[in-house]
Structure formats: structure tokens, C-alpha cells
Amino acid sequence: MRAVIQRVSRAAVTVNQCQTGAIGHGLVVLLGIHRDDQQAELEWLVDKIVHLRIFADEEGKMNRSLLDTGGAMLIISQFTLYGDCRGGRRPGYSQAARPEQAEPLYDSFIQRVQRYGVQTATGRFQAAMSVELVNDGPVTLLLDSAKIF
């Protein structure tokens, strides 16, 4: 699994001009699911994200987690995180999970985050979405359950 994590002061997602989710202070997580991903990768990634110390403490140091700050999470399915651009000019997506595999893992990711008590908002799986956010910092991080970066 891969995730692009952005610390935000606010964010919203719209599908067909209808807002499907919005948060204030927290994280936007663009989530890509690999064709070989299982529950173990999902659990590792959720635990890593909710405990990442990327929010400022009283001294202004990034030393507090999403759980520490009571922030929310906007979770967006993003198969293009597995786009392979090394060959030609059109990305290949053979490493991305097929929708019938990815959707249950996406739903499980959301449920796992909610078990931590984090308020969540989402887009709509396989929909064309518009995501608006105000990146706080800016802070943007990349995570991969295979730990390749």
C-alpha cells in the first residue's frame, strides 16, 4: 500500500458537484492499493499514519500525532499511486489492485482508522473526484508498506 499524506488545516472532496466529505484540521490521505496487499499491509499503514508525529507541539516542533491533536482524516482512494511511468508516455497500472480487491481493503482502511476514534471523511470509490485542501506547513509525506521509500 502507498499513501500520500498531507497535513491540512481543511479539506473537502466533491463528486458530481456534491460534497461527499470534508474535514478541518488533520490529514488528507491519498491511498493506493497494490495487487498483492493484504490485511497486514493495511494494519501497518493505518498504525503508522495515526501515530506519525507531524503536528507541532507547544515549542513548534513536529512532535504530536493525529491522535494527540484530535485531528480528522480525509481518505481518498488513489490507484494512480501505482502508475508506472518508466516505460513510455502512458503510465501502466498493472501493479494496482483491481477494483474488486481494492474496494474491500479501502473500506477496511477507513474502518480501522475509525477504531482509533479518528473522525473520517471519504470520497467515493472509483468516482471522478475533486479534492480541495489547504496544506498546512506545507507538510507532505510518502509512505509505502513495502518500505521502498
Image: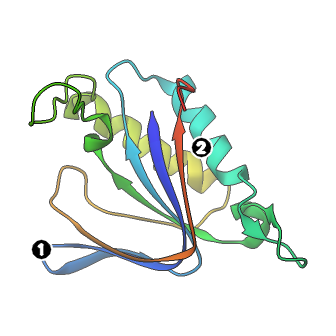
Residue 145 location, quadrant:
top right
Residue 122 - label = none
Which quarter of the figure is the C terminus placed in?
top right
Which quarter of the figure is the N terminus placed in?
top left
The residue at which mark 1 appears reads as 16
Q: Position of residue 137 (x, y in %)?
A: 60, 74
Residue 105 location, quadrant:
top left
107 left or right, relative to 118? left
Label 2 element class: helix
Amino acid marked by disc 1: Asn
Q: Between residues 50 and 55, which one lies in front from this camera angle?
A: 55
Q: Residue at x 15, y 60 (%)?
A: 128
14 left or right, relative to 49? left
Q: Position of residue 40 (x, y in %)?
A: 56, 24
Residue 46 - label = 2
Label 1 element class: loop
Q: Residue at x 42, y 23 (%)?
A: 37
Disc 2 to disc 1, C-alpha distance: 29 Å
Q: Earlier in the sequence, mark 2 or mark 1?
A: 1
Q: Between residues 67 and 117, which one lies in front from this camera angle?
A: 67
Q: Position of residue 50 (x, y in %)?
A: 66, 53
Amino acid marked by disc 2: Val
Residue 149 to residue 78: above or below: above
122 left or right, relative to 124? right
Counting other residues with Cα less than 10 Å from the Cα at mark 2, is it few (<14), some (14-19), or many (20 or more)? some
Q: Position of residue 112 (x, y in %)?
A: 57, 45
Residue 81 to residue 60: above or below: above
Q: Residue at x 73, y 62 (%)?
A: 67
- CB of mark 2 within 8 Å of CB of mark 1? no
